[in-house]
Amino acid sequence: MSEAFDGDRPAPRTPDETLADVQQLLASGTLPTFGSADELAQRREILERLAAVEAELAKLKPVHGGIGHNNPPADELDDDEGVLEQSREATAVIQAELSKQQPDVAKVAESASPLSSAAKFLAKKAAEKGLEEVAKRVWESPVAQSAIVAVGAAIYAAYDKIVDWLFSITLPF
């Protein structure tokens, strides 16, 4: 029996694997189908989830002391802020595309990957340092103790829905 099968059913695909499948379908010339009631409802749900991501990301902005403060952020903020900035940029691209009548599906698929990376990064960061340490050293905000988990969950929920939508509009039948 193959490892890909659990009994008579295939093992569930991860969102990352499904996204890779969708990208292969698009590269091979598969044309997406738009405009059904279900497809439009999925888009609205994605946009709602991306709005939740934006709200959670806004909570994670580093707190600085203002002009002349003597407490610059730690060097590790560069990596953290880079991942968060990529999430913000990806969210903006996906929102812009999904607002169009005929979204550029390849752009959406390409922009989904940074969301997956950010969700994994935040989960790893929380697990490595503990929420209090992350809040203290990275974002220095009590809100960040729960926000780091919330933003990771919001990003993953949006990513998962984006992948579902991409898969549904590229089905070959």
Image: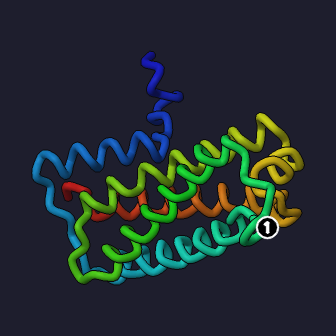
Please name the residue shown 67% across and 61% down the image. 151
Give the number of marks.
1
Left or right, 115 with reference to 73: left
Q: Residue furthest left?
A: 29
Left or right, 132 with reference to 1: right
Does 54 appear above or below 83? below
Please name the residue shown 52% across and 29% down the image. 6
Depth check, front residue: 129 or 4: 129
Left or right, 8 with reference to 49: left
Q: Which residue lies furthest to the front in this view?
A: 68
- Give the colour scheme shown: rainbow
Residue 172 % position (x, y): 19, 55
Does 6 appear above or below 163? above
Depth check, front residue: 103 or 77: 77
Please name the residue shown 33% across and 62% down the image. 108
Residue highlighted by disc 1: 65
Query: Residue type at mark 1?
Result: Gly
Crowd rating for badge 1 (residues with CA inside 10 Å; few <14, some 14–19, many 20+)? few
Quarter of the image with the N terminus in it: top left
Left or right, 138 with reference to 8: right
Please name the residue shown 84% across and 57% down the image. 145
Does 95 appear above or below 135? below
Q: What element carries label 1?
A: loop
Residue 121 % position (x, y): 61, 43
Q: Which residue lies furthest to the top in this view?
A: 1
Quarter of the image with the C terminus in it: bottom left
Residue 57 % position (x, y): 63, 66
Depth check, front residue: 21 or 10: 21
Residue 49 % position (x, y): 55, 72
